[in-house]
Image: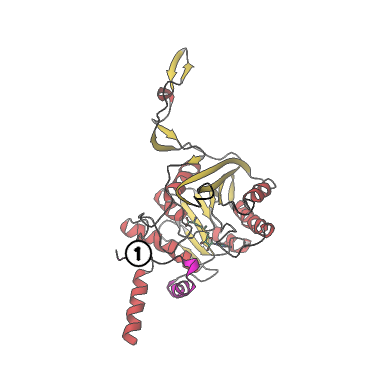
Amino acid sequence: MRKDPLPRLDTAPEIHQKLLEFCRLKPGEIWCDPVKGHRVGCLDATDNQQINRLCEDSPAASLAIQDPPYNLVAFETRSVEEYIEWCRRWIDNSQAHLCENSSFYVWLGADQNNGFQPLPEFMLMMRQTSFASRSFITLRNQRGYGTQKNWMSVRQELLFYTLGNPFFTPQYTEIPKSLKGYYKEIDGTFRENLERGHSPNIRAGNVWFDVQQVFYRMKENVNGCYAQKPLRAIDRILQASSQPGDIVLDFFAHAGTTLLAAEMSERVCLTSDIDPVFCEITIRRLEQWRKNKLTGWQNSNPFSDDLLSSAETNSAEG
Ligand SMILES: C[S@@+](CC[C@H](N)C(=O)[O-])C[C@H]1O[C@@H](n2cnc3c(N)ncnc32)[C@H](O)[C@@H]1O
């Protein structure tokens, strides 16, 4: 693989503009995967007609994993009231395509320099919906920022809500249990916790400290993307809250992590992104996985061949 990483696409408008010529989807269009039935739409998550088209003729989903821009850096900051109103629209669109017994996960940030917005407002708004709160998960990053004058910021928040009574099965880390000697009487016999457990490893609770955030040294890294979630975190959600064959929604595809994790675990993903470049990255990530079992580009990028041949044509013409 060549070493030609892309810069973060949100800070490189000229490169972003150049990449648009290599994108197969225009705003409003939907790509339907001929192999497994996944769908990728270049759509606005808040537009109910567009999202209805994405989900048309599909069975209802048992799971949604949503990772919206956080109102901090990802797009021009809105007032928190406008942001919450905007969230309410894609939440309604999610609910419209979730089945009666389903799970709803949302990644959300809290701006510690601005009253922790929008996390508390988001939680309060969710109380007005039919979703029941189930867990407040924190993914603990291993690297952080702001270490000299404040506690190092290492957390990513993940809210878990449900409708009805959906499937859930506990997940285990790869960390062996070390706490022994915790006895409980079962049928008249005292048994140690290690004997009683379902696994010799510790269960994944609501603090995930065993999942590495994506950075450039990892094989799954997709250069150009600035908000990519780890495959392992998405897979943990899929395993806990869905079953093979289920439909999974993700309206903010970006690097296409939910789609790829769904492909790997035999789920079907209906996903969208408002930006044609991220839709193209999502489709190419799936295609690359199918072709050579690579999960990302690490030191290269999804458009490397296109950029090279475009540069060669330009130099031949020049
Ligand atoms: C935080 S990223 C999602 C990261 C993703 N979970 C991953 O692992 O790669 C947010 C994405 O939402 C997209 N987006 C922003 N506004 C949108 C909208 N109204 N509808 C659909 N996508 C939108 C952005 O283009 C960006 O790619």
Q: Quadrant of the N terminus?
A: bottom left
Residue 200, horizontal then vertical, whole percent: 38, 30
Q: Is mark 1 within 8 Å of ligand 1?
A: no
Residue 189, horizontal then vertical, whole percent: 44, 13
Instruction: Out of 143 and 235, give the one closest to the viewer.
Output: 143
**Can you name the residue that lies furthest to the top here?**
188
Q: Is residue 21 magenta?
A: yes
Name the residue located 32 percent from the left edge and 79 percent from the top edge: 312
- Tell whether 273 sits left or right of 175: right
Which residue is disc 1 drawn over?
Answer: 300
**Residue 289 picture quarter:** bottom left
- Tell whether 204 sits left or right of 200: right
In this picture the colour scheme is secondary structure
Residue 206, horizontal then vertical, whole percent: 52, 39
Q: Quadrant of the C terminus?
A: bottom left
**Is 84 rendered above or below residue 182?**
below
**Can you name the residue that lies furthest to the bottom here?**
318
Instruction: Give the magenta-colored segment's residue range.
Output: 1-22
Name the residue located 62 percent from the left edge and 41 percent from the top edge: 133
Instruction: Out of 54 and 303, give the one closest to the viewer.
Output: 303
Instruction: Out of 197 and 318, give the one closest to the viewer.
Output: 318
Residue 258, horizontal then vertical, whole percent: 47, 53
> How many marks can you see?
1
**Residue 301 picture quarter:** bottom left
Q: Is residue 279 magenta?
A: no
**Can you name the residue that lies furthest to the front here?**
149
How would you rate the neighbour count of disc 1 (Cα within 10 Å): few for under 14, some for 14-19, many for 20 or more? some
Local secondary structure at mark 1: loop
Amino acid type, residue under disc 1 in the picture: Ser
